[in-house]
C-alpha cells in the first residue's frame, strides 16, 4: 500500500510539467576550432500527446 502511494506521488510530482505543455530538452557538445565552435547538438521533444511532430531545422549561415 505504501509503495503504491509513493509511486503515484512520484509520478505526479515528476510528470506535472509534461502534462501541462510539451518540453524541449537540448544537449550540445562543442569544441573550439580555428576561432569557431564546432560540435554536435541533439534536441528531444517531451510530450504526452500522440501524433506526428514536424521539426524545422535552423538554417546555417
Image: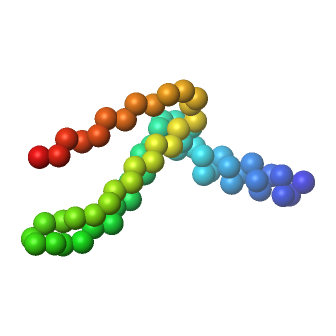
* Residue at point 51%, 43% (across, down): 46
Locate the N terminus and report the quarter of the image it occupies: bottom right
Residue drawn at the location 10% of the way across and 72% of the way down: 34
At which x and y percent is residue 56? 31, 35
Q: Which one is in front, 50 or 4?
A: 50
In the rendered image, which quarter is residue 53 located in?
Answer: top left
Q: Is residue 43 left or right of residue 3?
A: left
Q: How is the image coloured?
A: rainbow
Q: In the displayed image of the protein, which residue is found farthest to the right?
A: 1
Residue 43 versus residue 33 in the image, above or below: above
Residue 3: x and y in percent read 84, 58
Question: Left of 4 or right of it: where is 52?
Answer: left
Residue sitting at the far top: 51
Residue 20 in the image: state x and y as whole percent.
52, 36
**In the visual, does 50 lie left or right of 54?**
right
| Residue in the foreground of this view, choosing between 24 and 33 | 33
Residue at 58%, 29% (x, y): give it. 50
Outermost residue toward the front? Answer: 34
Classify 39 as above or below 26: below
Q: In this view, does 41 lie above or below 31?
A: above
On screen, residue 45 versus residue 35, left or right, reads right
Tally the marks.
0
Amino acid at each position: 500500500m505504501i509503495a503504491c502511494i509513493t509511486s503515484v506521488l512520484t509520478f505526479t510530482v515528476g510528470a506535472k510539467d509534461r502534462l501541462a505543455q510539451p518540453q524541449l530538452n537540448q544537449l550540445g557538445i562543442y569544441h573550439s576550432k580555428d576561432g569557431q565552435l564546432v560540435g554536435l547538438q541533439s534536441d528531444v521533444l517531451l510530450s504526452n500527446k500522440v501524433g506526428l511532430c514536424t521539426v524545422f531545422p535552423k538554417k546555417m549561415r
